[in-house]
Amino acid sequence: MSSILIIGAKSDIAKEVARIYAKNGYNLYLAARECGSLEDLKNDIEIRSGVEVELKEFDITSYDTHEGFYSSLKKRPLGVIVVSGYMAEQKAAQKEWSETLQMINVNYTGAISILNIVANDFEKERRGFIVGVSSVAGDRGRKANYIYGSAKAGFSAYLSGLRNRLHESGVQVLTVKPGFVNTKMTEGLDLPQKLTASPSEVAEDIFNAQQSGRNVLYTKSVWMVIMLIIKHIPEFIFKKMSI
Amino acid sequence: MGLLSWGMYPKIKNKIFSLRSKEALGTYIEKADEFIPYGNGRSYGDCALNENILYTKTYNNFLAFDEISGTLTCQAGVLLSEILDSFVKRGWFLKVTPGTKLITVGGAIASDVHGKNHHTEGCFSECVEEFDIMLPNGEIKTCKKGDELFRATCGGMGLTGVILAAKISLKKINSKNINQTTIKTKSLQETFEAFENYKEMPYSVAWIDCLAKDEEIGKCLLMVGDFANDSDLDYKSKKKLSIPFNFPSFALNNLSVKAFNKLYYAKAKDGVSKQKVDIDTFFYPLDAIGDWNRIYGSGGFTQYQFILPKEQSFEGLKKILRKISASGKGSFLAVLKLYGKENENYLSFPLEGYSLALDFKIEAGLFELLNTLDEVVLRCGGRIYLTKDVRVSCETFEKGYPLIEKFRAFRRENNMDKKLNSLQSKRIKI
């Protein structure tokens, strides 16, 4: 059976993405920093679905290790899903350069470093799929989180170009733009329930969109409409708004 | 905005803490002044609501499975549906399951849920071999059948501590299908006779037409069945339809309920008929419609479920069905079930007899009607199911549950009454 590589496997979304691919018979590589803490999830998935799960140590900001990491996989994965993300407080990031840099490195530079390697390999093989979890925050910069948003915007643009490049080789590239999601990252925030998805809903949407060959996925789908409106507000009005 | 229960009434604001690790829970319990664990929000009333809520669905790893004995150990936030997704195709099913698979294992223990096979297999606690629970002092205890903590926790509405993990035994099956027999009856007398005639069948449940009048009161469709033996284990849970918004309140008027009941009853053949149906159709018909609670409108609804001892069941049910029929507050669903022997747990609902469950839209005059039904239930020596309840009085509750003082004393001795409370536990002073 084919394998799927999940980068950033510790997040709540990644956990549910892992479970749904396993449920559908895929073996998994779960890659994360200090991956030992994923033993419980590995055990959980093996009991649930009887697939093979291998934990892989991976640091998305150690770019020079990425080549070696990818070639250490025993079997070439059929798909690679990048779920890694880092969101610092906007205000903290405005003051602390290290926080800004970390957001850029995790959400943009690191993701691109590993995906360049994967893309070259998949292009040569003329098969496979790449899923990048970006964010609606990348659709337009807002004062509430534009540093995070701009890194995600870069990532979305990268995925769009990659899709264009790999189309000819038959490699699918799916950009995922979640809105609000109930996760560790958003615990304690008062999110509007109708616009907020659970990690398992997001994972199910990702799986279905990937399997049906989609290009861009907003989850929940209502975010496509919301962002369409937000993107079209004229700048002279937008700059005065607080949203 | 806060978490709601299935009945969407009452609506209160709450602070949510998600359970992710024992360590974090230890700190939370130490600091919290009062909270209640919350699973998947399928209890109807206020038993899982409070200002502080411990959200447990985030604690949902499978921990171990023994292929030979069929015992599964999992964390408390695992949904029954997740167990089915993994194990039906390997030939295992839940020994006891309620009419929805969308509840957590922790919730199943706290409500000591039962299903269509109560008369043969008892409550959910029967299949629980042991569980781990964190007490209000932060101590984690593993508890087994026979322990007082076990008797208090199974059916204890989450008021004894936070259930962390449980070891449950599954049942071997050789099919995902059920051979079902449907019996259409014309009166309450015929309904009771049918239950008695088919009591050897492991699974049974009846749908009652509550709007029937006079001689027709209590007419029903009784569905009984058992697993087929056809080696067809190809189970995939169905894609569900969903109700995307709250229906306007006029959508569920007397007329539409009548129409629904008529359609349901009319579609069945007269007398006895046989069907082969799958697990989801037989056990979880309503799960196929996601968020079906929304058809009652944003004002919410409640389910009134009571049980009467066997000897009083016929007369008691007749009286109650007459009152409901006369009130015109028809129920979308009325489910009648035969139960087996009572267990030893302090607050488990079932006793040997018949229970009826009916949904009511929350509206003026409803609670008064339910109060008059309570009187009949008490006179018959029956009780009200806490998992469905949102309005019962302390007095009615106490009369139905003779072991309540033991439960209260146990809570006090272990300082559970300070840390663990729900709106319901405060209302009826548990």
Image (tube, grey):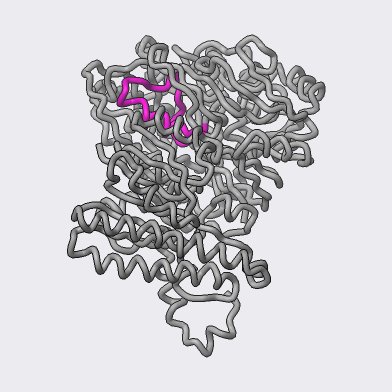
Examine the rendering and report whether any part of residue B213 can be seen: no
Position of A138 relative to A18 (above/below): below
Look at 58% across and 55% down and name the residue there.
Answer: A186
Tell me: B35 left or right of A207.
right
**On the rendered image, what quadrant is the C terminus of chain A found in?**
bottom right
**Which image quadrant is residue B84 in?**
top left
**On the rendered image, what quadrant is the N terminus of chain A found in?**
top left
Q: Nearer the viewer, residue A56 or A17?
A: A56
Magenta-span inclusion, residue B81: yes
Look at 28% across and 17% down and name the residue there.
Answer: B174
Measured as percent of width and height from the top left, residue B303 is found at 54, 37
- How many numbered discs, if any? 0
Tell me: B267 left or right of B56.
left
Residue positioned most to the bottom = A236
Position of A107 relative to B138 (above/below): below
**Which image quadrant is residue B236 in?**
top left
Measured as percent of width and height from the top left, residue A90 is found at 62, 68
Position of B270 relative to B327 (above/below): above
Q: Nearer the viewer, residue A135 or B173?
A: A135
Tell me: B92 left or right of B318.
left
Magenta-span inclusion, residue B414: no
The region drawn magenta spans B78-104
Measured as percent of width and height from the top left, residue B45 is found at 60, 40
Q: Nearer the viewer, residue A14 or B318?
A: A14
Look at 27% across and 21% down and name the residue there.
Answer: B175
Measured as percent of width and height from the top left, residue B114 is found at 50, 23
Position of B182 relative to A149 (above/below): above
